Image (cartoon, rainbow, N blue to C red):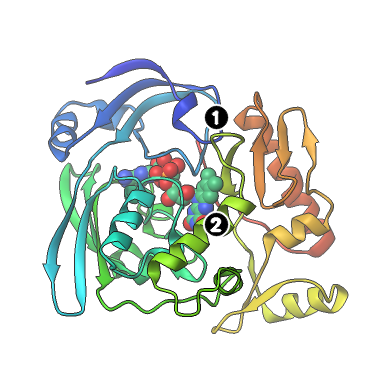
Protein backbone atom coordinates (compact mmCIF):
# COMPACT_ATOMS: atom_id res chain seq x y z
CA UNK A 1 0.00 0.00 0.00
CA UNK A 2 1.36 3.41 -0.99
CA UNK A 3 2.16 5.70 1.94
CA UNK A 4 3.22 9.33 1.86
CA UNK A 5 5.80 11.31 3.85
CA UNK A 6 7.28 8.40 5.75
CA UNK A 7 10.24 8.94 8.08
CA UNK A 8 13.32 6.89 7.15
CA UNK A 9 15.14 7.60 10.43
CA UNK A 10 14.78 4.06 11.76
CA UNK A 11 15.31 2.57 8.27
CA UNK A 12 18.89 3.77 7.68
CA UNK A 13 21.76 2.78 9.98
CA UNK A 14 23.29 6.28 9.89
CA UNK A 15 20.04 7.31 11.59
CA UNK A 16 19.53 10.36 9.37
CA UNK A 17 16.25 12.08 10.03
CA UNK A 18 14.93 12.17 6.47
CA UNK A 19 11.64 11.24 4.88
CA UNK A 20 10.46 9.63 1.66
CA UNK A 21 7.79 11.44 -0.33
CA UNK A 22 6.27 8.06 -1.19
CA UNK A 23 6.89 4.69 0.40
CA UNK A 24 5.73 1.19 -0.41
CA UNK A 25 6.54 -2.08 1.37
CA UNK A 26 7.01 -4.93 -1.13
CA UNK A 27 6.26 -8.38 0.29
CA UNK A 28 5.92 -10.26 -3.01
CA UNK A 29 6.70 -9.95 -6.70
CA UNK A 30 3.04 -9.50 -7.65
CA UNK A 31 3.10 -6.06 -6.04
CA UNK A 32 5.94 -5.08 -8.39
CA UNK A 33 3.98 -6.22 -11.46
CA UNK A 34 0.94 -4.29 -10.26
CA UNK A 35 2.91 -1.13 -9.52
CA UNK A 36 4.57 -1.35 -12.93
CA UNK A 37 1.15 -1.22 -14.60
CA UNK A 38 0.65 2.22 -13.04
CA UNK A 39 3.16 4.98 -13.87
CA UNK A 40 4.57 5.06 -10.32
CA UNK A 41 7.88 3.41 -11.22
CA UNK A 42 8.55 5.43 -14.35
CA UNK A 43 7.67 8.83 -12.90
CA UNK A 44 9.01 8.60 -9.37
CA UNK A 45 12.69 7.49 -9.47
CA UNK A 46 12.18 4.38 -7.33
CA UNK A 47 14.77 3.64 -4.67
CA UNK A 48 14.97 0.13 -3.27
CA UNK A 49 15.66 -0.07 0.43
CA UNK A 50 16.82 -3.17 2.29
CA UNK A 51 18.23 -2.69 5.77
CA UNK A 52 19.54 0.81 5.00
CA UNK A 53 23.03 -0.21 6.13
CA UNK A 54 24.87 1.00 3.05
CA UNK A 55 23.05 4.15 2.09
CA UNK A 56 23.65 7.81 2.84
CA UNK A 57 20.63 10.07 2.39
CA UNK A 58 21.85 13.58 1.58
CA UNK A 59 18.35 14.90 2.15
CA UNK A 60 14.69 13.87 2.10
CA UNK A 61 14.02 11.42 -0.73
CA UNK A 62 11.71 13.16 -3.19
CA UNK A 63 10.60 9.95 -4.97
CA UNK A 64 9.24 6.49 -4.23
CA UNK A 65 11.03 4.20 -1.77
CA UNK A 66 10.29 0.49 -2.21
CA UNK A 67 11.12 -1.46 0.94
CA UNK A 68 12.09 -5.05 0.26
CA UNK A 69 10.20 -7.36 2.63
CA UNK A 70 10.16 -10.49 0.45
CA UNK A 71 10.66 -13.38 2.86
CA UNK A 72 11.35 -17.12 2.69
CA UNK A 73 14.16 -19.66 2.49
CA UNK A 74 13.85 -22.98 0.68
CA UNK A 75 16.19 -25.70 -0.56
CA UNK A 76 15.62 -25.91 -4.30
CA UNK A 77 18.26 -28.51 -5.20
CA UNK A 78 20.52 -30.91 -3.38
CA UNK A 79 23.35 -33.27 -4.29
CA UNK A 80 25.67 -35.33 -2.14
CA UNK A 81 28.05 -32.38 -1.75
CA UNK A 82 25.98 -29.25 -2.18
CA UNK A 83 22.71 -27.62 -1.36
CA UNK A 84 21.08 -24.71 -3.20
CA UNK A 85 19.21 -22.32 -0.93
CA UNK A 86 16.78 -19.82 -2.48
CA UNK A 87 16.07 -16.84 -0.25
CA UNK A 88 13.58 -14.00 -0.45
CA UNK A 89 15.49 -10.74 -0.93
CA UNK A 90 14.05 -9.18 2.22
CA UNK A 91 15.53 -11.83 4.51
CA UNK A 92 18.12 -10.46 6.90
CA UNK A 93 21.56 -11.59 5.73
CA UNK A 94 22.75 -12.68 9.18
CA UNK A 95 19.59 -14.77 9.71
CA UNK A 96 20.39 -16.59 6.47
CA UNK A 97 23.96 -17.16 7.72
CA UNK A 98 22.66 -18.55 11.03
CA UNK A 99 20.23 -20.82 9.16
CA UNK A 100 23.10 -22.29 7.13
CA UNK A 101 25.27 -22.74 10.22
CA UNK A 102 22.48 -24.67 11.97
CA UNK A 103 22.39 -27.06 9.00
CA UNK A 104 26.21 -27.21 8.76
CA UNK A 105 26.14 -25.88 5.20
CA UNK A 106 29.44 -24.10 4.62
CA UNK A 107 30.23 -20.92 2.71
CA UNK A 108 28.73 -18.01 4.63
CA UNK A 109 30.40 -18.34 8.05
CA UNK A 110 33.16 -15.76 7.38
CA UNK A 111 30.47 -13.27 6.41
CA UNK A 112 28.57 -13.57 9.70
CA UNK A 113 27.06 -10.39 11.14
CA UNK A 114 27.21 -8.27 7.97
CA UNK A 115 24.13 -6.06 8.36
CA UNK A 116 21.37 -5.73 5.77
CA UNK A 117 19.27 -7.96 3.56
CA UNK A 118 20.28 -10.77 1.24
CA UNK A 119 18.57 -8.87 -1.61
CA UNK A 120 21.22 -6.16 -1.30
CA UNK A 121 24.15 -8.56 -0.98
CA UNK A 122 24.85 -8.72 -4.76
CA UNK A 123 24.91 -4.92 -5.12
CA UNK A 124 28.45 -4.61 -3.82
CA UNK A 125 29.26 -8.33 -3.77
CA UNK A 126 29.51 -8.20 0.02
CA UNK A 127 32.53 -9.73 1.61
CA UNK A 128 34.51 -10.13 4.79
CA UNK A 129 37.36 -12.20 6.22
CA UNK A 130 38.45 -13.69 2.92
CA UNK A 131 34.98 -14.60 1.61
CA UNK A 132 32.73 -12.87 -0.90
CA UNK A 133 29.16 -13.40 -1.99
CA UNK A 134 30.32 -14.40 -5.47
CA UNK A 135 32.01 -17.52 -4.00
CA UNK A 136 28.62 -19.00 -3.09
CA UNK A 137 26.35 -17.22 -5.54
CA UNK A 138 24.26 -19.34 -7.94
CA UNK A 139 21.82 -16.79 -9.38
CA UNK A 140 19.34 -14.09 -8.55
CA UNK A 141 15.85 -13.22 -9.65
CA UNK A 142 14.98 -9.60 -10.18
CA UNK A 143 12.16 -7.45 -11.42
CA UNK A 144 13.43 -5.44 -14.37
CA UNK A 145 11.91 -2.02 -13.75
CA UNK A 146 12.67 -0.87 -17.29
CA UNK A 147 10.73 -3.65 -19.00
CA UNK A 148 8.30 -4.73 -16.26
CA UNK A 149 9.29 -8.40 -16.18
CA UNK A 150 11.16 -10.90 -14.01
CA UNK A 151 14.66 -11.94 -15.08
CA UNK A 152 17.19 -14.46 -13.76
CA UNK A 153 20.84 -13.42 -13.71
CA UNK A 154 23.83 -15.69 -13.09
CA UNK A 155 27.23 -14.68 -11.67
CA UNK A 156 28.62 -13.72 -15.06
CA UNK A 157 25.61 -11.49 -15.80
CA UNK A 158 26.12 -9.78 -12.43
CA UNK A 159 29.76 -8.88 -13.28
CA UNK A 160 30.91 -9.13 -9.67
CA UNK A 161 34.09 -7.33 -8.70
CA UNK A 162 35.61 -6.01 -5.48
CA UNK A 163 32.61 -4.28 -3.81
CA UNK A 164 31.19 -3.90 -7.28
CA UNK A 165 28.68 -5.41 -9.68
CA UNK A 166 26.40 -4.71 -12.63
CA UNK A 167 24.01 -3.08 -10.12
CA UNK A 168 26.47 -0.28 -9.36
CA UNK A 169 27.33 0.17 -13.03
CA UNK A 170 25.20 -0.26 -16.18
CA UNK A 171 22.32 -1.89 -14.29
CA UNK A 172 22.11 0.80 -11.60
CA UNK A 173 18.50 1.58 -10.69
CA UNK A 174 17.13 -1.00 -13.12
CA UNK A 175 16.59 -4.17 -11.08
CA UNK A 176 14.67 -4.96 -7.91
CA UNK A 177 16.36 -8.12 -6.61
CA UNK A 178 13.58 -10.34 -5.32
CA UNK A 179 15.42 -13.64 -4.63
CA UNK A 180 18.99 -14.88 -4.32
CA UNK A 181 20.02 -18.52 -4.61
CA UNK A 182 23.21 -19.66 -2.89
CA UNK A 183 25.24 -22.81 -3.48
CA UNK A 184 26.46 -24.14 -0.14
CA UNK A 185 28.82 -26.90 0.84
CA UNK A 186 27.49 -29.92 2.73
CA UNK A 187 31.04 -31.02 3.50
CA UNK A 188 32.46 -27.69 4.58
CA UNK A 189 36.09 -26.82 5.06
CA UNK A 190 36.98 -23.75 7.07
CA UNK A 191 39.05 -20.72 6.12
CA UNK A 192 40.71 -19.09 9.15
CA UNK A 193 43.54 -17.31 7.35
CA UNK A 194 42.10 -13.79 7.53
CA UNK A 195 42.09 -11.22 10.28
CA UNK A 196 42.25 -12.55 13.79
CA UNK A 197 40.13 -15.67 13.25
CA UNK A 198 42.92 -18.20 13.84
CA UNK A 199 44.24 -16.30 16.88
CA UNK A 200 40.74 -16.04 18.39
CA UNK A 201 40.08 -19.76 17.93
CA UNK A 202 43.45 -20.59 19.44
CA UNK A 203 42.68 -18.36 22.41
CA UNK A 204 39.44 -20.30 22.86
CA UNK A 205 41.35 -23.60 22.74
CA UNK A 206 39.65 -24.74 19.52
CA UNK A 207 42.12 -26.68 17.38
CA UNK A 208 39.72 -28.29 14.90
CA UNK A 209 37.15 -25.59 14.21
CA UNK A 210 33.89 -26.19 12.38
CA UNK A 211 31.91 -23.50 10.58
CA UNK A 212 29.96 -22.67 13.76
CA UNK A 213 33.25 -21.92 15.54
CA UNK A 214 34.44 -19.71 12.69
CA UNK A 215 31.12 -17.87 12.70
CA UNK A 216 31.37 -17.30 16.46
CA UNK A 217 34.93 -16.03 16.09
CA UNK A 218 33.94 -13.63 13.30
CA UNK A 219 31.00 -12.34 15.36
CA UNK A 220 33.30 -11.85 18.34
CA UNK A 221 35.93 -9.96 16.33
CA UNK A 222 33.41 -7.79 14.47
CA UNK A 223 31.56 -6.90 17.67
CA UNK A 224 34.79 -5.75 19.31
CA UNK A 225 35.98 -3.72 16.33
CA UNK A 226 32.97 -2.15 14.66
CA UNK A 227 30.49 0.26 16.19
CA UNK A 228 26.97 -1.10 16.56
CA UNK A 229 24.66 1.07 14.39
CA UNK A 230 21.95 0.69 17.05
CA UNK A 231 24.24 2.64 19.38
CA UNK A 232 26.23 4.87 16.99
CA UNK A 233 24.98 5.65 13.48
CA UNK A 234 27.27 4.33 10.74
CA UNK A 235 27.38 2.33 7.51
CA UNK A 236 30.46 0.21 8.20
CA UNK A 237 33.42 0.88 5.90
CA UNK A 238 32.77 4.21 4.24
CA UNK A 239 35.51 3.82 1.62
CA UNK A 240 36.74 0.91 -0.47
CA UNK A 241 40.31 -0.24 -0.06
CA UNK A 242 42.00 1.43 -3.05
CA UNK A 243 43.50 -0.81 -5.71
CA UNK A 244 46.61 0.83 -7.15
CA UNK A 245 49.46 0.01 -9.51
CA UNK A 246 52.53 -1.83 -8.20
CA UNK A 247 54.56 1.38 -8.70
CA UNK A 248 52.21 3.45 -6.55
CA UNK A 249 52.22 0.77 -3.83
CA UNK A 250 56.02 0.51 -3.97
CA UNK A 251 56.41 4.29 -3.65
CA UNK A 252 54.02 4.42 -0.69
CA UNK A 253 55.70 1.50 1.08
CA UNK A 254 59.16 2.96 0.55
CA UNK A 255 58.09 6.24 2.12
CA UNK A 256 56.03 4.48 4.82
CA UNK A 257 57.35 0.99 5.56
CA UNK A 258 54.42 0.35 7.94
CA UNK A 259 51.84 0.84 5.13
CA UNK A 260 49.54 -2.13 4.62
CA UNK A 261 49.40 -3.61 1.13
CA UNK A 262 47.88 -6.77 -0.29
CA UNK A 263 49.38 -7.76 -3.64
CA UNK A 264 46.78 -8.95 -6.14
CA UNK A 265 47.21 -11.77 -8.67
CA UNK A 266 46.94 -9.28 -11.57
CA UNK A 267 50.00 -7.32 -10.40
CA UNK A 268 48.06 -4.48 -8.74
CA UNK A 269 48.02 -3.92 -4.99
CA UNK A 270 45.18 -3.23 -2.58
CA UNK A 271 45.98 -0.68 0.11
CA UNK A 272 44.25 -0.45 3.46
CA UNK A 273 42.08 2.68 3.31
CA UNK A 274 41.78 2.61 7.10
CA UNK A 275 45.57 2.77 7.47
CA UNK A 276 45.80 5.78 5.10
CA UNK A 277 43.03 7.67 6.91
CA UNK A 278 44.49 6.92 10.33
CA UNK A 279 48.01 7.83 9.21
CA UNK A 280 46.70 11.13 7.86
CA UNK A 281 45.45 11.93 11.36
CA UNK A 282 41.68 11.60 10.91
CA UNK A 283 40.98 8.80 13.37
CA UNK A 284 38.69 10.10 16.13
CA UNK A 285 38.15 13.44 14.33
CA UNK A 286 34.80 15.04 15.09
CA UNK A 287 33.04 18.10 13.71
CA UNK A 288 29.62 18.68 15.22
CA UNK A 289 27.95 15.28 15.17
CA UNK A 290 29.85 13.99 12.14
CA UNK A 291 33.02 12.08 12.85
CA UNK A 292 35.58 9.39 12.11
CA UNK A 293 35.26 6.47 14.52
CA UNK A 294 37.83 6.50 17.30
CA UNK A 295 38.73 2.79 16.92
CA UNK A 296 38.26 2.26 13.18
CA UNK A 297 39.26 5.10 10.84
CA UNK A 298 37.40 3.56 7.89
CA UNK A 299 34.05 4.12 9.60
CA UNK A 300 32.37 7.54 9.54
CA UNK A 301 29.85 8.02 12.31
CA UNK A 302 26.82 10.09 13.20
CA UNK A 303 26.98 11.02 16.88
CA UNK A 304 23.32 11.98 16.85
CA UNK A 305 22.15 14.85 14.71
CA UNK A 306 24.60 14.93 11.81
CA UNK A 307 23.06 15.19 8.35
CA UNK A 308 24.02 13.16 5.32
CA UNK A 309 25.40 16.33 3.74
CA UNK A 310 27.71 16.86 6.74
CA UNK A 311 29.03 13.29 6.62
CA UNK A 312 29.50 13.60 2.87
CA UNK A 313 31.38 16.86 3.24
CA UNK A 314 33.70 15.24 5.82
CA UNK A 315 34.20 12.28 3.46
CA UNK A 316 35.20 14.64 0.64
CA UNK A 317 37.72 16.41 2.87
CA UNK A 318 39.27 13.06 3.74
CA UNK A 319 39.47 12.02 0.07
CA UNK A 320 41.18 15.30 -0.82
CA UNK A 321 43.64 15.02 2.06
CA UNK A 322 44.60 11.42 1.19
CA UNK A 323 45.08 12.44 -2.43
CA UNK A 324 47.40 15.27 -1.46
CA UNK A 325 49.35 13.31 1.17
CA UNK A 326 49.65 9.92 -0.54
CA UNK A 327 48.59 10.44 -4.20
CA UNK A 328 45.96 7.73 -3.71
CA UNK A 329 42.30 8.22 -4.66
CA UNK A 330 39.76 6.90 -2.20
CA UNK A 331 36.41 5.78 -3.56
CA UNK A 332 33.26 5.64 -1.48
CA UNK A 333 31.75 2.25 -0.74
CA UNK A 334 28.51 3.72 0.61
CA UNK A 335 25.70 4.58 -1.84
CA UNK A 336 24.51 8.17 -1.74
CA UNK A 337 20.99 9.40 -2.51
C1 LIG B 1 28.40 -1.99 10.98
C2 LIG B 1 28.44 -2.34 9.50
C3 LIG B 1 29.34 -3.29 9.05
C4 LIG B 1 29.38 -3.63 7.68
N1 LIG B 1 30.26 -4.58 7.27
C5 LIG B 1 30.30 -4.95 5.97
C6 LIG B 1 31.21 -5.97 5.53
O1 LIG B 1 31.93 -6.55 6.31
N2 LIG B 1 31.22 -6.27 4.20
C7 LIG B 1 30.39 -5.67 3.31
O2 LIG B 1 30.46 -6.02 2.13
N3 LIG B 1 29.51 -4.72 3.70
C8 LIG B 1 29.44 -4.35 5.01
N4 LIG B 1 28.57 -3.37 5.41
C9 LIG B 1 27.71 -2.72 4.42
C10 LIG B 1 26.29 -3.33 4.30
O3 LIG B 1 26.02 -4.16 5.39
C11 LIG B 1 26.14 -4.16 3.02
O4 LIG B 1 26.44 -3.38 1.89
C12 LIG B 1 24.71 -4.71 2.87
O5 LIG B 1 24.66 -5.60 1.78
C13 LIG B 1 23.67 -3.62 2.68
O6 LIG B 1 22.41 -4.25 2.78
P1 LIG B 1 21.10 -3.40 3.02
O7 LIG B 1 19.94 -4.33 2.90
O8 LIG B 1 21.20 -2.66 4.30
O9 LIG B 1 21.14 -2.42 1.79
P2 LIG B 1 20.65 -0.88 1.71
O10 LIG B 1 21.56 -0.03 2.52
O11 LIG B 1 19.20 -0.81 2.02
O12 LIG B 1 20.89 -0.59 0.18
C14 LIG B 1 22.20 -0.51 -0.34
C15 LIG B 1 22.12 -0.29 -1.85
O13 LIG B 1 21.55 -1.43 -2.48
C16 LIG B 1 20.33 -1.11 -3.15
N5 LIG B 1 19.42 -2.24 -2.89
C17 LIG B 1 19.06 -2.70 -1.68
N6 LIG B 1 18.27 -3.77 -1.82
C18 LIG B 1 18.10 -3.97 -3.15
C19 LIG B 1 17.38 -4.93 -3.92
N7 LIG B 1 16.64 -5.88 -3.35
N8 LIG B 1 17.44 -4.84 -5.28
C20 LIG B 1 18.18 -3.86 -5.86
N9 LIG B 1 18.88 -2.93 -5.19
C21 LIG B 1 18.84 -2.99 -3.84
C22 LIG B 1 19.88 0.20 -2.54
O14 LIG B 1 19.06 0.94 -3.42
C23 LIG B 1 21.21 0.87 -2.24
O15 LIG B 1 21.74 1.46 -3.40
C24 LIG B 1 28.49 -3.01 6.77
C25 LIG B 1 27.57 -2.05 7.25
C26 LIG B 1 27.53 -1.73 8.59
C27 LIG B 1 26.52 -0.74 9.10
- Could you tell whether 13 is left or right of 241 in the image? left
Between 195 and 46, which is closer to the camera in this rendering? 195
- Could you tell whether 282 is left or right of 88 in the image? right
What is the tally of numbered marks visible in this picture? Answer: 2
Q: Is residue 123 above or below residue 4?
A: below
Q: Which label is found at residue 39?
A: none
The crowding category of the residue bearing disc 2, from other C-alpha atoms within 10 Å (few below 14, some 14 to 19, many at least 20), is some
Q: Which label is found at residue 15?
A: 1
- Mark 1 and mark 2: span between their CA atoms? 24 Å
Query: Which residue is located at x 49 percent, y 24 percent?
Result: 9
Between 11 and 107, which is closer to the camera in this rendering? 107
- Could you tell whether 121 is left or right of 103 in the image? right
Residue 132 in the image, given as x and y percentages of width and height: 43, 66
Q: Which label is found at residue 220?
A: 2
SS at badge 1? loop
Residue extending farthest to the right is 255
Q: Earlier in the sequence, mark 1 or mark 2?
A: 1
Residue 174: tell me if it is visible: no
Amino acid sequence: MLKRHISLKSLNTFGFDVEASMFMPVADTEILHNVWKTNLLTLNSPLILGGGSNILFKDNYPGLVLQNLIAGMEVVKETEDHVWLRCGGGEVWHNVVMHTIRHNWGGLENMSLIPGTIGASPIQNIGAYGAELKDVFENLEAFDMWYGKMVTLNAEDCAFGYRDSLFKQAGKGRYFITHVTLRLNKKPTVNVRYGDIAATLEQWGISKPGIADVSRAVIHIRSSKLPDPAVLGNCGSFFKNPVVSKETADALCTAHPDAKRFDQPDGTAKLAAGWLIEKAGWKGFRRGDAGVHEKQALVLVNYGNATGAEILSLAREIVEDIQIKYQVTLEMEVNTR
